[in-house]
Amino acid sequence: MNWDDTAPPADDTTGRLVGSAADGEDQAVEAALRPKSLAEFVGQERVREQLDLVLRAARQRGATADHVLLSGAPGLGKTTLSMIIAAEMEAPIRITSGPAIQHAGDLAAILSSLQEGEVLFLDEIHRMSRPAEEMLYMAMEDFRVDVIVGKGPGATAIPLELPPFTLVGATTRAGLLPPPLRDRFGFTAHMEFYEPAELERVIHRSADLLDVTIDTAGAAEIAGRSRGTPRIANRLLRRVRDYAQVKADGRINQEIAGAALRVYEVDARGLDRLDRAVLEALLKLFGGGPVGLSTLSVAVGEERETVEEVAEPFLVREGLLARTPRGRVATPAAWAHLGLTAPQSHGTGGSGQGDLFGA
Ligand SMILES: Nc1ncnc2c1ncn2[C@@H]1O[C@H](COP(=O)(O)OP(=O)(O)OP(=O)(O)O)[C@@H](O)[C@H]1O
């Protein structure tokens, strides 16, 4: 394997326990926790089945696999799948990312050094520069690039043949890809958030690899707070392991997991301090809205972008907050989650002060 860059993740959630982008510790540990084969890869049944067919067929033909596009939120296993594709094809893999390829020449250098059958993993492919993107069209289709030598009227294009390779592109924003690029992938897989039962399997598998003892209820407790994302499940598992080691005998059960995540301020639904601050302001200060984003941000003491890009996506996905033309509005589920009673016009919520952290 060959890393061409260490570009920062696309979103800015690094540092949050429930952030979906990889932080430094994740990067160090993730290599050890990555499933190495399709059979080991948990969940995503449809993607796995389809990919298995694509790869088997290519192997039977003795051919290089078609280009693959993986779309989905950070931490759902796109990098892992790209490595599995290479492993299943018994091919080497080169890893780079869109932001690392600013000039067409950067891409030409990578492409021209690929071996036959090699897998090129291009993370955040939607963030590549336009000239590089155009070079990629020809490389994907004809395994050829035109390298431009010189400048202005004297510039000449020197054609360069490439060995057949498999491009695995990953993006969190498939909609941002230009159609000519999207159309050049032979197989496109959209990765969904994981069900709690699937995350439980991820947690049990990781616990085995980390030599941690965890029971079924303990794994379920962590899975429920992991926001549908294996990376977060693995991170919460490591933090709960710390707690279990320091405060108990190292073994994780439901009580230990609940207590640990209460310390780390990750509630029963996976909301952290920032998420709850936004919801609380919306409910307690603005009666559930509608309220404008700027006002809400000032009330929470955070930047607009932080509220909009870091906290809101998960709150919207969970059905706790709606973005409407008149402003942000809390849903009845938000009132219930914070254990508050909604005013009449907002429907019914829970009453009394519930224990947000479960356990
Ligand atoms: N299906 C899965 N089964 C088991 N573990 C998984 C699965 N998907 C992801 N993981 C674990 O989650 C971690 C994050 O996965 P990965 O790095 O592949 O995500 P990603 O989608 O590439 O994220 P990013 O978009 O930030 O690059 C890995 O350590 C891996 O062990």
Image (cartoon, rainbow, N blue to C red):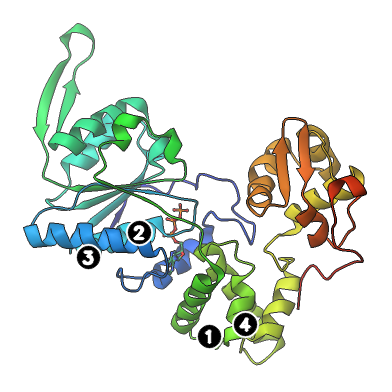
Q: Residue at x 63, y 47 (%)?
A: 313
First in sequence: mark 2 or mark 1? Answer: 2
Place of residue 2 in the rendered image (x, y in percent of width and height, measured from the top left): 28, 55
Element carrying mark 3: helix
Which of the 4 image quadrants contains residue 106?
A: top left
Residue 47, disc = 2
Residue 218, disc = 4
Q: CA distance from mark 2 to mark 3?
A: 15 Å
**Few, some or many residues within 10 Å of mark 3 (<14, 14–19, 20+):** some
Query: Given the image, on which type of amino acid does mark 3 rest?
Result: Glu
Q: CA distance from mark 1 to mark 3?
A: 29 Å
Cβ atoms under marks 2 and 1 closer than 8 Å: no
Query: Given the image, on which type of amino acid does mark 4 rest?
Result: Gly
Q: CA distance from mark 4 to mark 1?
A: 12 Å
**Few, some or many residues within 10 Å of mark 4 (<14, 14–19, 20+):** many
Element carrying mark 4: helix
- Mark 1 residue CB less than 8 A from any atom of ligand 1: no
First in sequence: mark 4 or mark 2? Answer: 2
